[in-house]
Image (tube, rainbow, N blue to C red):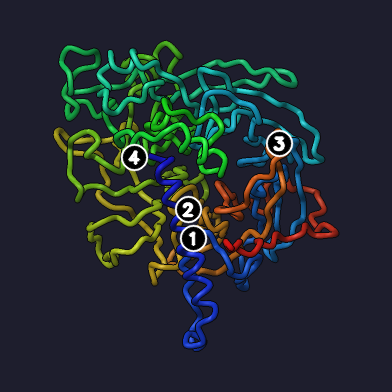
Amino acid sequence: MKKRYFILLLFVTISARSFTQMNDNDSTNKKTAPVHRNMFGYGIPRGLTKTSEGLADGYILFAVPNSPFVDLINRKGEVVHQWKSNYGVFEAYLQDDGSLFQAVDDPDFPVFGCCGPYGRIQKISWDGKILWDYEYANEQHIAHHDFAVMPNGHILAIAYEVMPYDKAIAMGRKPELTPKSGPWTEEIVEIVPDGMTGGKIVWEWHLWDHLIQDADSKKSDYGNVADHPELLDFNLGAPLPPPITQGALDTLIAKGMAHRNSTLDNRGSDIFHFNAIKYNADLDQIVFSSPNISEIYIIDHSTTTQEAAGHKGGRYGKGGDFLYRWGNPQNYKRGDSTNRTLFGQHDIRWIEKGTPGAGDLTVFNNHPPGEIDWSNMGTTGKNYSMVYEFAPPIDKKGNYIIEKGKPYGPEKPVWFYRAADTLSFYSSFISGAQRMPNGNTFINEGAKGRFFEVTPQGEIVWEYLNPYHGNIREPNGDSIPAMPMPFFEFRGNFIPANHPALANRKLEPIVPQPSVFILPPPTTDK
């Protein structure tokens, strides 16, 4: 599904670019500022575009696309510090000592052919020394998308895990949903850094231990899906993409529209596509997200690995089963489209202690919520994104409440942000949101590389669009095309000025400032 969607994005890119260029030359629109509809930010001002008095003191941390650099900018949009790796950086998280844990692109990982694999996690010091460089990428699994740093310095990483075709069929996955090479299911591993390149896995959770299916009573994991919201229906997800020839696939790879590891047999292997993970130390819980089926999940980390493979044990008594899920109760047959709240979401996280809304969860909802009619929201039928804050219902013992035969609540968020025009805020993929200490919300509109801050009333008080793009090349020396996403940002983070990592550091604009990236003019066929 993601591969087909990426091809669709390319067509959207071409159309949006032409649309933007026509608007820029349309003298009839001079009286009002144009609404920049193109999702990738072509042809619009970049850098700092809006600021206000009285902003919370702090900085923005983000990885420069196609680059080994992670930048820290001040509220004026000036780069005050850079960390440099030896690989392209996907995302980074600042630690109290000024170091970063970062996901970097392993240049030669095998097997996995799409959808956010990076395969390598590094720790890099404030002054750019690599302190740890760990590879989690082989023919069986690869770290992908997000990871979380625990208070003890351990890493919780999402990873794809190969499931052989025969095992998938034996567990009740429908053949028409199963690629010949087998699906990629998901695992979460807790890694303890060991030396410069080592890592010890001390806890693990595998999705395949928590599946159910109601398609074939003769296969394992058969059961009534509606009776088991703690398990995931193995037959969720889109059908396989239409077959193509090897020649067509070779062309897609050559044009950068398919990964070098893509094969005719693994197209459609990424069935659930977990894309975000966070850890709550007080609850000892993990939350993660699956945009492919538009749902977020919470599991118990207090279990042993053995308990995590089962249905009993741990602080909450449910082993590795879901403690909570939200966003699309159709997935467990306890609702219909009117109960659905999430559509291809990213970046689920708890609001931190001491911050307004603490204990609630925030999520970036990438696509519009269909015909759901929440009070004072409405819909326009156009593509747009939203940010939600929602509060899971919990009893006095800390258990998530679900009534018999009904889906998990809440029915609607306690707060949401959507652009008033529904046109100027939209990212069909990646992106994120973070509650700030002052009660505002920091939003990363990923496809456009746009960071902005909104008040609880929805007023934008600060905005910055990433103007940078690197020049990392393929292992064979080939350049990597900047199009269609020259400025994209998977995960940016607001760093308060009182963060321990910044104590007693001189954070002045570096000289010279990095060179901004100028998008080459479109090529024309003769």
Residue underneath mark 1: 14
Percent x, y of residue 526 = 59, 63
Pointers 3 and 2 in contact (C-beta within 8 Å)? no
Q: Is residue 372 visible?
A: yes
SS class, disc 2: helix
Residue underneath mark 4: 295
Residue underneath mark 2: 10
Residue underneath mark 3: 87
Q: Is residue 396 visible?
A: no
Q: Quadrant of residue 183?
A: top left
Q: Quadrant of residue 132?
A: top right
Which residue extends farthest front?
526
Of pointers 4 and 2, the one earlier in the residue sequence: 2
SS class, disc 3: loop
Q: Is residue 137 above or below residue 392?
A: above
Mark nearest the camera among 4 and 3 is 3
SS class, disc 1: helix
How far separated are the C-alphas under marks 3 and 1? 30 Å
Pointers 3 and 1 in contact (C-beta within 8 Å)? no
| In this picture, residue 516 sits left or right of residue 115 | right
